[in-house]
Amino acid sequence: MTTPGLENLAYLNALNCLPFLGPRRITALTMHFTTAKKAWEAPYKDLKQVEGLSDFTSRIVESREMIDPNFEWSRIEKHGIRCAGVDSPEYPDLLRELSCPPPILYYRGELKTDGRPSIAIVGSRRSTFYGKEVAHRLAGDLAGAGVSVVSGMALGIDTAAHRGCLENSGYTVAVLGCGLDNCYPPANADLMNQISSTGAVVSEFPLGTKPLPGHFPQRNRIISGMTLGTVVVEATAKSGSLITADLALEQNREVFAVPGNVGSPYSRGCHQLIKEGAHLVESAADILNEIMFDQAPEEREEQLTITDPRSSFTDAEKALLKAIPYQPMHIDDIVRLVEGSASEVITTLLELELKQVIRQTPGKYFCRI
């Protein structure tokens, strides 16, 4: 720790390693003592003077005896993790606007501060095929329009959103509810590496923090706080995604919801949001229209133009695409629906896949996207 900036981050991390403090108390300490180091080294009698901390003074004094700020900082460096305090230039501007932003962020990758707009896409872990396809398409189209995509790297909708953004060379941020020395869920280890190579994986929790249930509502305020708006793709009536939507409203951000099947329990949360005034989303254009309010009309029109590959379709491709539904259909059923041999249909299906208007799923099923 050779610079004041690194020293402050090291002591912020040490304070953050006291789990009973939390963002508000850490902020109160650093504001009272002006630096994290002074807060860490403050004697009992001075700590007692900090408003709202009198009941925690003894715990702070006892707990910090078991933590070496320099050793904890060396662990962060060993894991290749970087940190940003609220005053750091790489700290997200929108997140800094919150009433109580995280005092310190841990991240792998790069936190970009180039002024590009950002949108959160969230939804159920137990999502439907429809929901994942919508999340994937929305994220890809937003990436193509220069919008960053933020989500929580959970299975289901979050994963589909991250992948849709990555596959369209976009910038995506994953916010975790655990320390960055953990990957949660473990099945997304490869995805975590992909995100950190071109985007960022972020957490406010120190090393060693497990993905406990209570951490995820806290994590959600960062997802919504880093963005101009939150899109809920699928959510049950009691989904955690609705917490993110509520936080977005509290943070004065936009809320969007994707409608679904009226009989599906995974659509009830989204339909409730729409009833309460959330923007209904059918395409990325519905989102861009709301968040590009500060751009000139000609710039807005240019970014809203999402390339449509259908302009280069052959007659055979148009006919086959018309026969393929948005829900997976087996190739044998597709062949029976259209004229032509099986080999001709397979060839045309391949062309449609290359044009990214259909997708093959396991078992030789195809669907429109």
Image (cartoon, rainbow, N blue to C red):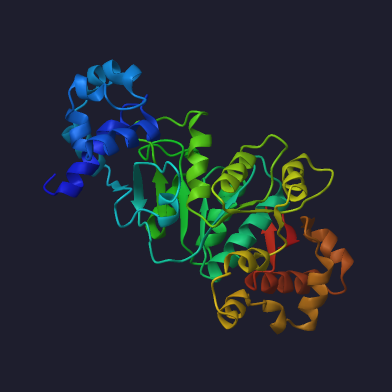
Q: Nearer the viewer, residue 44 or 189?
A: 44
Residue 218, placed above or below residue 90: above
Q: Nearer the viewer, residue 24 or 348?
A: 24
Residue 18, placed above or below residue 129: above
Left or right placement of residue 96 versus residue 149 in this view: left
Residue 47, placed above or below residue 189: above
Question: In the image, what residue occupies the spot 52% across and 41% down?
Answer: 220
| The image quarter in which residue 238 lies | top right
Residue 229 placed where, x, y %? 58, 55
Left or right placement of residue 329 versus residue 102 in this view: right
Question: In the image, what residue occupies the spot 43% across and 50% down?
Answer: 95
Left or right placement of residue 17 versus residue 343 in this view: left
Question: In the image, what residue occupies the spot 48% across and 32% down?
Answer: 215
| The image quarter in which residue 263 lies | top right
Q: Nearer the viewer, residue 149 or 228?
A: 228
- Residue 321 is at least partly visible in this image: yes
Q: Quadrant of the N terminus?
A: top left
State how many labels appear: 0
Left or right placement of residue 10 versus residue 289 in this view: left
Residue 69 placed where, x, y %? 19, 33
| The image quarter in which residue 16 lies | top left
